[in-house]
Amino acid sequence: MSRVFNFNAGPAALPLPVLEQVREDLPEWHGCGMSVLEMSHRAEPFLSIARQAGIDLRKLLGVPDGYHVLFMQGGATAQFAAVPMNLLGEHRSADYVVTGTWSQKAAEECGKYGQARIAARPADGRFTRVPPHAEWKLDPDAAYLHYTPNETIAGVEFHWVPEGINVPLVADFSSSFLSHPVDVKRFGLIYAGAQKNAGAAGITIVVVRKELLDRKPLTQLPKVLDYREMAARDSMMNTPPTFAWYVSGLVFRWLLDQGGLEGIAAVNARKSGQLYDYIDSEAFYVNPVDKTARSRMNVVFTLADAARDADFLAGAKRAGLVGLKGHRSVGGMRASLYNAVPEEAVKTLVEYMREFARTHG
Ligand SMILES: *Cc1c(COP(=O)(O)O)cnc(C)c1O
């Protein structure tokens, strides 16, 4: 077997012990005579898998009793619509802090159902920093304030949680979910697609404060996006993505074994720190993001000469380093360092970058 070092932005690397467990559980799960892929979502074997995943996630993230944990479909993109449709209620508008492509898309989708007020956006139009809280223009009557703690494409991350916000805080945690401890109490709603840091594509996790579901949803709200329906039926209002749910459960277990979110956060800080330190030490590579807002999950960088990009990527591939091409909208390179990317991958990447700079600089 030869596995590469996988820096894909999503779907992305999964922990090897999780993949090995999946293999062991095929074609038969725990003496059931069938695999998880083939089980009824209404029968006990799958119900126990689903229940345990919920328990483990609550433990890992420290989800208080006053919150529902929902397992949904449609990715973060479906949540761009679900959030306003469920939470606008009697409010006319919601506030959005725009720090990159994803928060921009979230705001645009909200605009179909109500008004998305832009509370803040970098004045220079470049997504290289997080506008300081003092610059935000907040509406005290907003339904909620939405922001994206980690912008996957620009490599921009909040290293703080907005404080003193008098409306519920809603966060798209897709690309930094479970990468460090989070104080759930400070949020009204958190959502994340699993395929970046918490499993396979096909399942989306929503953690929502129960009292927010007292708001009156839009009458056109599809049943599959209705948090009340999902909460009342333990996320089994219709057929859930059973296999993806099971894989997420294995990832939660693996994270608990890594010392939980404190443990994995320490590893993540070392990984991104090592790569940024090297980039900063070498004029051949540039990271454009303000140092206070650099992402610990998605490290973007450009080469001094963009004409070398193709050579860089081809050589990286030969060295077993894949998934380093930057998003098509920004170009350059991006190394996604999600939880399942080992420290050895970063070490190997830095060695490759050093050698490439030496021979092409
Ligand atoms: C990947 C990503 C999305 C889009 O997720 P889908 O599951 O493809 O809908 C949205 N927001 C962030 C921050 C992301 O990283």
Image (cartoon, grey):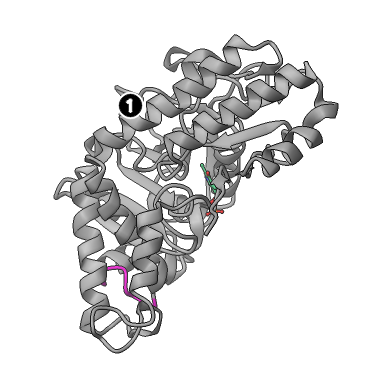
Residue holding disc 1: 165
> What main secondary structure does the magenta stretch of the protein show?
loop
**Residue found 65% across the figure and 25% down from its top:** 353
Q: Position of residue 219 (x, y in %)?
A: 44, 65
Mark 1: few/some/many CA within 10 Å (<14, 14-19, 20+): few
In this view of the protein, which residue sits in the foreground, 238 or 343?
A: 343
User: How many callouts does the rendering have?
Assistant: 1
Q: Tell me: residue 338, above or below residue 280.
A: below
**Residue found 38% across the figure and 77% down from its top:** 26
Q: Is residue 126 visible?
A: no
**Residue found 24% across the figure and 44% down from its top:** 61
Q: Tell me: residue 195, above or below residue 137.
A: below
Magenta region, residue range: 233-239
The image quadrant that residue 128 belongs to is top right
Q: Position of residue 36 (x, y in %)?
A: 35, 78
**Residue found 38% across the figure and 40% down from its top:** 170
| Identity, as a three-letter code, of the amino acid under mark 1 | Ile
Q: Is residue 21 visible?
A: yes
Q: Tell me: residue 330, above or below residue 178.
A: above
The image quadrant that residue 247 belongs to is bottom left
Residue at far left of view: 65
Q: Tell me: residue 109, above or below residue 18.
A: above
Q: Position of residue 57 (x, y in %)?
A: 25, 52
Q: Is residue 339 left or right of residue 209?
A: right
What kind of element bears circle 1?
Answer: loop
Q: Position of residue 359 (x, y in %)?
A: 76, 20
Instruction: Residue 234: say if magenta.
Output: yes
Instruction: Residue 129: say if magenta.
Output: no
Residue at far front of view: 1
Q: Is residue 213 left or right of residue 131?
A: left
Q: Is residue 242 left or right of residue 95?
A: left
